[in-house]
Image (tube, helix red, strand yellow):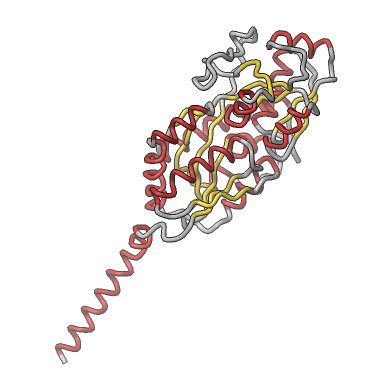
Amino acid sequence: MLAQRLHGWLTAIAIAALSCIAPHGASAAYPDRPIRLIVPFAPGGSTDILGRILADTLHPILGQPIIVENRPGAGGNIGGDFVARAAPDGYTLLLAAAGPTVINPSLYRNMPYDPAKDLAPISCLEREHNLMVVGKSMPAKTLQEFLAYARAHPGKLSFGSPGNGSPAHLAGELLNQKAGLKMQHVPYKGTGPAITDLVAGHIDMIIDNMPALLPQVKAGNLRALAVPSDKRATAAPDIPTFSEAGLDGFVVMAWKGLMAPAKTDPAIIERLHAAVLQALADPKLRTRFQELGAEPLGNTPAEFARQITEETAWWGKLVASTGASVQ
């Protein structure tokens, strides 16, 4: 009888112990199957390009394939909402960009999700330069020549962007404000389609992320006029800043980050954060990022969260000043 009772007590203790460590055990086993990385824009843009480089680098670090899945639309909201609603198990992640994360909350009247509440920050991956480019048929060869040409043809020139309210859209509207221009905005479902139309001569200009535009400049398909940064880009040291080209106070940088659904196990977040830092330290990734105009960063989840809060306020003021809005 005593032996039976002792066996029962030991069994109960073992079950209780296992119930306490099960969540940690599950996290320790993470990941044990492929991970989906949601890119909220169409293929060919900066988010897609950098996301695929990151996925290739993370694969051997995490020991599982990272499957990139494009879910474009609504300025990145469709992809962001998909991740926000996904199971918080670490197997559906978001390649976050400034547009859907810190701009759309001020731009869209009916956001389907709250990036600050429904997504868990893991790390900001990089800061990247933007680039102002024009098509080969544009007669202007410098920023000042372009501004003069645009002023001489009010309402005739157009600029493209990967969608309403995207950083590229707001950058174009900001240029209209600062330089007294009247360019028309043409939104696309991603940077890739916008580049295609710019190369074909259907639009006149784009200010967007350097990783997507610089290869087209190097190939001779587009002409770069300036970078809206406080210093020249390492990847393109021959291209002047806006200030150097004659327009002061025009600085619009971009970034990409990694996020998970809210309520994801902190142990999984930490596992992913460690993997991201290891990936960002990889010489091949760093070289590839820098060649494209992206400077590898890598901050903590808490630092990334503060960055999102601060930039949401900054972009909110810019959105208000341009009067931009999306239903």
Please give left or right for residue 120 compared with residue 97 in the image: left
Front residue of 290/178: it is 290
Left or right relative to 137: residue 92: left
x and y percent of residue 207 in the render?
66, 24
Q: Nearer the viewer, residue 137 or 11?
A: 137
Name the outermost residue toward the front: 219
Quarter residue 191 falls in: top right
Number of marks drawn: 0
**Residue in the picture at 53% in, 49% down:** 37
Residue nearest the viewer, comparing 65 with 245: 65
The residue under the point 38% across, 39% down is 277
Q: Nearer the viewer, residue 201 or 296?
A: 201
- State the residue lying farthest toward the left: 2
Residue 121, compared with residue 220, is above or below; it is: below
The answer to whether residue 261 shows anywhere in this view is no
Q: State which quarter of the image contains the C terminus.
A: top right
Q: Residue at x 47, y 58 (%)?
A: 89
Q: Give the x, y percent position of residue 306.
A: 47, 34
Q: Quadrant of the N terminus?
A: bottom left
From where the camera sits, is residue 13 visible? yes
Residue 200 position in % (x across, y down): 77, 29
Horizontal arrangement in the rendering, residue 278 relative to residue 291 (left or right): left
Residue 262 at x, y percent in the picture: 50, 51
